[in-house]
Image (tube, rainbow, N blue to C red):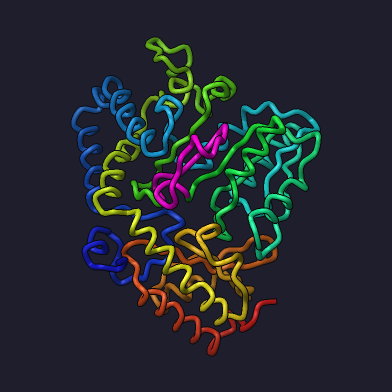
């Protein structure tokens, strides 16, 4: 069961804080963080050997472990610092032309909306944020609404497998299959997926996929992968042109050379992926994740009832993982978040999506029902005693 001390004691989180925000940056267990520090010490003990001579081999070992975990060829993966960096590689090199369209949804991560808007405006293309009605009702309804944004000008689709602000699992597998039938490039933001729900890149069939390891896989911060199918890899230039271009010692992959060989940087976080996978396996994280999803689902309706709103989806595994977003009525999201932290020592995000506002709680193995009960009591007191959260959602 989750919340047991043997799991909670594995994390470095401040025990005085009720941490309900795993979805933002994750948190690193002690054995993985120790592995991170060991790599950093090895780097500092002989930086030339580490970076210039041994780094390629260290990265290869890590990519092989990750490739086995997500079911792909290790040479089709490259490590980057975060999913926004990964999508910038794609958007910058996509060679959009005037009139082209990138089809997406109105539920995407804000930084990536900005990325697509930036590159689309430079090329006079259009980033189409197709509205998805909330609450969602069925996979079929989501798919139907998504494709209403398609036109003869659509060049590619970009979609999250699990959304950030609304914490919804979208039917990406079905959408990618339909997109390929239309001859479209498929780009998936899987920032919240690795270590959260099962990920098999051969089943999703996305042409391009990025997933954060520093969230639910629990590696140190700044560890993300970018997967690109081999036939599309030559399309994408590096964001930083460095030693991998016209390399003096090229590997068998221009994709790896271009995006991996960037001179002086600390890539120790990338090398902790094998230890993270070992930790996940040793602690039966599939069962832990199942318990977490069940806790989320058991509490979702209860919290919505408290604030007078409705869940954003049917409460089941088709739409929910280890987090959910509660529609709330507040005009002071930052003040509400700060109040929950300062007064109640609860770390939890309050986030807008369009005109709507959401309180999102994330659950992992160190959490217990008592954590959510503490949040419930805090919200009751806030509703009764302040103007930060009004009862009933507009």
Give the residue drawn at x 71%, y 38%: 102
Q: Main secondary structure of the magenta part?
A: loop
- Looking at this view, is 378 or 8 the one in front? 8
Q: Does residue 206 belong to the magenta stretch?
A: yes
Of all residues, the one furthest to the left in this rendering is 45
Is the residue 308 above or below the residue 233 in the image? Answer: below
User: Residue 339: x, y in percent?
Assistant: 48, 76
Give the residue drawn at x 62%, y 82%: 390
Left or right: 175 in relation to 280: right
Is the residue 385 above or below the residue 151 in the image? Answer: below
Quadrant location, the C terminus: bottom right
Is the residue 132 above or below the residue 356 in the image? Answer: above
Q: Does residue 158 belong to the magenta stretch?
A: no
Quadrant location, the N terminus: bottom left
Give the residue drawn at x 24%, y 50%: 282
- The quadrant holding residue 25 is bottom left
Give the residue drawn at x 54%, y 73%: 335
Left or right: 165 in relation to 192: right
First to last magenta residue range: 193-215
- The quadrant holding residue 244 is top left
User: Residue 289: x, y in percent?
Assistant: 38, 58
**How many numbered circles does the render carry?**
0
- Looking at this view, is 93 or 65 the one in front? 65
Left or right: 83 in relation to 99: left
User: Residue 159: x, y in percent?
Assistant: 61, 45
Of all residues, the one furthest to the bottom in this rendering is 384
């Amino acid at each position: 069961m989750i919340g047991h001390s043997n799991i909670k004691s594995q994390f470095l989180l401040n025990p005085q804080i009720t941490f309900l925000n795993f979805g933002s940056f994750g948190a690193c267990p002690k054995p993985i963080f120790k592995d991170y520090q060991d790599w950093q010490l090895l780097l500092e003990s002989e930086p030339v050997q580490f970076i210039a001579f041994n780094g390629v081999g260290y990265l290869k070992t890590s990519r092989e472990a990750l490739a086995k975990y997500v079911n792909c060829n290790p040479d089709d993966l490259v490590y980057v610092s975060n999913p926004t960096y990964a999508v910038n590689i794609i958007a910058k090199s996509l060679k959009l032309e005037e009139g082209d369209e990138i089809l997406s949804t109105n539920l995407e991560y804000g930084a990536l909306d900005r990325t697509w808007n930036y590159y689309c405006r430079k090329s006079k293309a259009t980033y189409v944020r197709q509205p998805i009605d909330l609450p969602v009702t069925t996979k079929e309804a989501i798919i139907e609404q998504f494709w209403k944004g398609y036109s003869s000008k659509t060049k590619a689709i970009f979609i999250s497998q699990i959304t950030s602000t609304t914490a919804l699992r979208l039917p990406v597998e079905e959408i990618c299959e339909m997109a390929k039938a239309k001859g479209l490039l498929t780009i998936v933001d899987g920032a919240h997926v690795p270590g959260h729900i099962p990920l098999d890149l051969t089943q999703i069939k996305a042409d391009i996929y990025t997933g954060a390891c520093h969230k639910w896989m629990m590696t140190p911060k700044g560890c993300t992968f970018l997967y690109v199918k081999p036939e599309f890899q030559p399309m994408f230039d590096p964001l930083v042109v460095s030693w991998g271009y016209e390399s003096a010692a090229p590997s068998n992959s221009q994709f790896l050379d271009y995006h991996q060989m960037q001179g002086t940087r600390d890539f120790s976080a990338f090398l902790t992926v094998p230890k993270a996978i070992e930790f996940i396996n040793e602690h039966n994280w599939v069962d832990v994740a199942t318990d977490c999803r069940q806790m989320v689902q058991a509490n979702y309706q209860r919290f919505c009832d408290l604030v007078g709103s409705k869940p954003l989806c049917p409460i089941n595994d088709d739409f929910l993982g280890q987090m959910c977003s509660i529609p709330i009525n507040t005009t002071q999201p930052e003040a509400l978040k700060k109040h929950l932290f300062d007064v109640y020592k609860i770390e939890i995000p309050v986030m807008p999506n369009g005109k709507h506002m959401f309180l999102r709680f994330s659950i992992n193995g160190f959490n217990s029902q008592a954590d959510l009960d503490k949040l419930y009591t805090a919200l009751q007191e806030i509703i009764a005693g302040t103007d930060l959260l009004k009862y009933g959602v507009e």
